[in-house]
């Protein structure tokens, strides 16, 4: 087992006296697993994805020009821009899947010849691609109104990508204009018309705004397909954590083994702390419940959106996971909210499956928040292990080897006081805020094992949060 040592140079005398012997050889011992249902016998965790969208959303009666692209771009330019975007998706978040929109105004047009660069750049690096149809005039009100145009579009797309095992097809995004029977009939007809497409590469959306998988999952004509599931807080209002778990799981029915959550999301601006289990914020409760449920059920997911989407008064979709900088093909990305990104990776199965104690090898005693205080500034000490939540810690993966170390009883982080870089700075408990003084990296400490030191990951905004518009995506 790895032993964890703190190698910080900014220990306080107080901290050195009490904790140096503890943190010099800390053993990590799992003490509790995340609560949830027994994992399914099959899973869809191979999908670790994000949606790349048009600014303003993908419901466009015209060509689909994704955020960062220009309609004047050539195929080569689109592909170069896509490569830059995918570099960010992969390196910053560990993405291996991108969901892209198609419509009748794009496919078969001159723009399609360039737009295909987004697909080709993804598959060239081994990404899975989900191509989903957004209504564009050939569909309106959640129903197909021009079946000839819809059919011609899909015939072109499947002819060009049907033999590429990385490309998946979603016949219609959010078929909310259909009854359950009408929708399953249309989906079954789409599949029957394209027998060469393996069913495992077709994603059939749930009924409504892809909200309910039960009628689709129960239709034997759709056996073997994957299922596309959408779940947002604005669909269902305010709930506590348990209520969000129930809401997410209820509409899956018994279908989790075939389901991919192709749209879900929450505010990623203004510094909400998605690592805080005690948060009273509805978005935080929602996002933690959804990511915990997907992890427990071994479900893959595709976050909405990575880039693009509904543009707020701030000039971006407030749910967007990434910031976009640069111009031309020199595009770079940043994580908008590190705690949100960490929770998304948690939903994908990254990180520890439960809480741990930090135990000193020399004494067998545990790292402890004194008196189980939940206050900012509470002292950290060595104390006899007693199973208390103030001695249990969650290691929240922030990517690139960085973690927050979070007390289970308070949801607060191990913190270098006032972000000091000086010798004798205090180590204490403080509300998690994404600061660099709360982010730790494992380092090789030779024979002693591993070490934790504060490091410098992506920064996060700490502005106050405000609600997102409540219209369905």
Image (cartoon, helix red, strand yellow):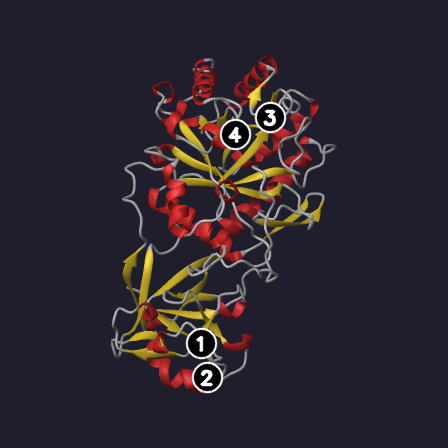
Q: Nearer the viewer, mark 1 or mark 2?
A: 1
**Image coords of residue 382 (percent x, y):** 32, 79
Q: Residue at x 68, y 21 (%)?
A: 109
Q: Is residue 372 left or right of residue 55?
A: left
Q: Residue at x 52, y 57 (%)?
A: 338
* Residue position for label 2: 12
Are dots 4 and 3 in contact, CB under 8 Å?
A: no
* Residue position for label 1: 428
Camera-side residue of 331 and 154? 154
* Residue position for label 4: 174
Image quadrant containing the N terminus: bottom left
User: Does the image show residue 24?
Assistant: no
Q: Secondary structure at mark 1?
A: strand
Decide: is 199 above or below 257. Answer: above
Q: Secondary structure at mark 3?
A: loop
Q: CA distance from mark 2 to mark 3?
A: 61 Å
Outermost front residue: 238
């Amino acid at each position: 087992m790895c032993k964890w040592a703190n190698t910080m140079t900014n220990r306080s005398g107080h901290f050195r006296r009490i904790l140096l012997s503890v943190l010099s050889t800390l053993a990590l011992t799992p003490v509790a697993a995340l609560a949830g249902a027994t994992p399914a016998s099959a899973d869809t965790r191979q999908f670790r994805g994000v949606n790349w969208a048009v600014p303003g959303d993908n419901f466009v009666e015209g060509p689909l020009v994704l955020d960062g692209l220009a309609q004047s771009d050539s195929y080569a330019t689109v592909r170069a821009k896509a490569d830059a975007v995918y570099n960010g998706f992969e390196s910053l978040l560990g993405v291996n899947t991108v969901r892209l929109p198609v419509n009748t105004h794009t496919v078969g047009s001159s723009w399609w010849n360039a737009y295909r660069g987004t697909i080709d750049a993804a598959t060239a690096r081994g990404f899975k691609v989900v191509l989903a149809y957004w209504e564009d005039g050939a569909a309106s009100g959640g129903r197909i109104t021009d079946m000839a145009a819809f059919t011609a579009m899909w015939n072109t797309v499947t002819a060009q990508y049907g033999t590429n095992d990385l490309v998946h097809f979603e016949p219609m995004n959010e078929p909310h204009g259909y009854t359950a029977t009408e929708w399953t009939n249309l989906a079954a007809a789409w599949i029957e018309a394209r027998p060469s497409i393996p069913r495992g590469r077709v994603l059939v959306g749930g009924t409504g705004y892809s909200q309910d998988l039960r009628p689709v999952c129960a239709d034997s004509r759709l056996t073997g397909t994957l299922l596309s599931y959408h779940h947002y807080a604005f669909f269902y209002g305010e709930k506590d954590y348990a209520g969000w778990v129930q809401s997410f799981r209820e509409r899956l029915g018994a279908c989790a083994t075939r389901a991919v959550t192709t749209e879900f999301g929450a505010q990623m601006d203004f510094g909400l702390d998605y690592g805080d289990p005690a948060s009273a914020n509805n978005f935080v409760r929602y996002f933690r419940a959804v990511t915990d449920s997907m992890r427990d059920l071994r479900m893959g997911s595709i976050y909405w959106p990575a880039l693009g989407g509904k543009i707020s008064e701030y000039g971006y979709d407030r749910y967007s996971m990434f910031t976009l900088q640069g111009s031309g093909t020199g595009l770079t990305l940043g994580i908008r909210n590190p705690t949100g990104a960490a929770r998304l990776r948690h939903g994908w199965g990254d990180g520890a499956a439960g809480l741990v104690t930090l135990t000193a090898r020399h004494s067998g005693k545990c790292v402890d928040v004194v008196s189980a205080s939940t206050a900012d500034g509470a002292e950290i000490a060595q104390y006899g292990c007693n199973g208390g939540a103030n001695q249990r810690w969650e290691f929240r993966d922030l990517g690139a080897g960085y973690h927050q170390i979070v007390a289970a009883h308070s949801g607060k982080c191990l913190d270098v006081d006032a972000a000091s870089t000086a010798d004798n700075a205090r180590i204490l408990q403080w509300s998690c805020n994404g600061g660099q003084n709360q982010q730790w990296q494992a380092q090789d400490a030779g024979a002693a094992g591993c070490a934790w030191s504060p490091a410098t990951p992506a920064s996060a905004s700490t502005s106050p949060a405000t609600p997102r518009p409540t219209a369905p995506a």
